[in-house]
Amino acid sequence: MAAEALSLRERARLLVQREVGRVLSPIWVPFVVALMRFGMGWRIEGLPEARRAYRKLWGGSRHGVIVCANHLTMVDSFMIAWALAPPWWYVLHYRSLQWNTPERENFARTLAMRAAIFVAKCIPVRRGGDRREVGKVLARITWLLSRGEAGLMFPEGGRSRSGRVDLMASTYGVGRIARAVPGLRVLCVYLRGEGQTTWSDFPARGERFRVRVEELEPKSDHGGLRGSLEVSRQILAKLGDMEREHFDARR
Amino acid sequence: MERKEIFEKVVKILTPHVKNQAALATVTDSTHILDDLKVNSARLVDVVLAFEDEFDIEIPDEDVDSVNTVGDCVRLVAEKLG
């Protein structure tokens, strides 16, 4: 797969998208964070530790980072970005703001929504859709990460219907990307609100979240699809461990 | 291996993952695995891995992108078997 699969036109389009977002980032990044912080009244515990770990990943390295997280709501990607760095950091280090692959049905219905996600480093995908289209999206993310950008993916492939990390739901896309990009760092993120008992569209107003982060070096002796799936499962297993720690700490 | 034999084995491997069992009765090359048979997309990888085990072949990551229909599976396996 990887970068060679992308045409010059596709690469140029991604670079334009990145630059448009970067130029507008002093406006939209603080706006989105302010909306979550003050508009919705959300709070996140564990920010200093999470942000320290994320900054450390970027210090002195030009390699990309893939953030792998549990998934409970449609705004998790925004919450996770907020948890990992303050708005000014993203404005100054724009490559560290994660690319996302939101569900097309949810986020690309109207022209305004498509424009918004274009600016916000998103590449919409129809989950469970045509495999060639999904493959192209994975190739785009792979190319971006190979250029030292950050990406965010949900190894479960969608919001956890059980409300807990579903170890059986592992998709292979994360592992495929992790194996395709040399030097790629993997950061596992577990984010959950006190009132989140299951999945939903949005967290409740005033929700208090707790974030945990842990770097992982997944490995596999297998090649091809089997290797990619094994790497995905290791990442998902780590998220499962982090979930256990989350609930143990709350007993 | 005959194409018909590959087709039958492919359908047999798909069967445990099929949610729309009624569609299995009329399965053809053009039957869409996700849309018609309602196989969960996350399980498609398990299906392809089962092809690797059953036919003793290795399927690269990117070849999964070409799998949409039962016929795609048969073609992919036949190609790998040479």
Image (cartoon, rainbow, N blue to C red):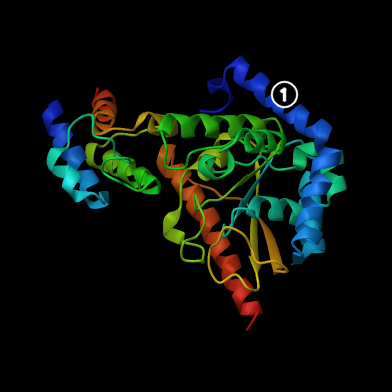
Residue at image mark 1: A16
Instruction: Answer with the quarter of the image where residue B78 lies.
Output: top left
Q: Amino acid at mark 1?
A: Val
Image quadrant for the C terminus of chain A? bottom right
Residue A142 visible at all? yes
- As drawn, is A66 to the left or to the right of A156? right
| Residue A60: % across, % down | 82, 41
Q: Is residue A211 left or right of residue B45?
A: right
Q: Give the image quarter of residue A243.
A: bottom right
Residue A224 in the image: above or below residue A82: above
Q: Nearer the viewer, residue A247 or A103?
A: A103
When the figure is inspected, residue A17 is found, relative to residue A28, above or below; the finding is above
Residue at left offset 46%, top offset 66%: A162
Quarter of the rendering containing residue A107: top right
**Residue at x-position 55% and y-position 28%:** A2
Q: Identify whether B8 is placed above or below A37.
A: above
> How many numbered discs sit on the rendered protein?
1
Residue at 35%, 43% in the rendered image = B44
Side of B44 where A65 appears, left or right: right
Residue A187 visible here: no
The local crowd at label 1, few if under 14, some if 14 to 19, many if 20 or more residues have their Cα within 10 Å, is some
- Residue A144, position in %: x, y? 66, 31
Residue A213, x across and y down, in percent: 69, 60
Q: What x and y, as percent, mark residue A124?
A: 57, 37
Q: Could you tell me which residue is drawn at 47 percent across and 42 percent down? A: A127
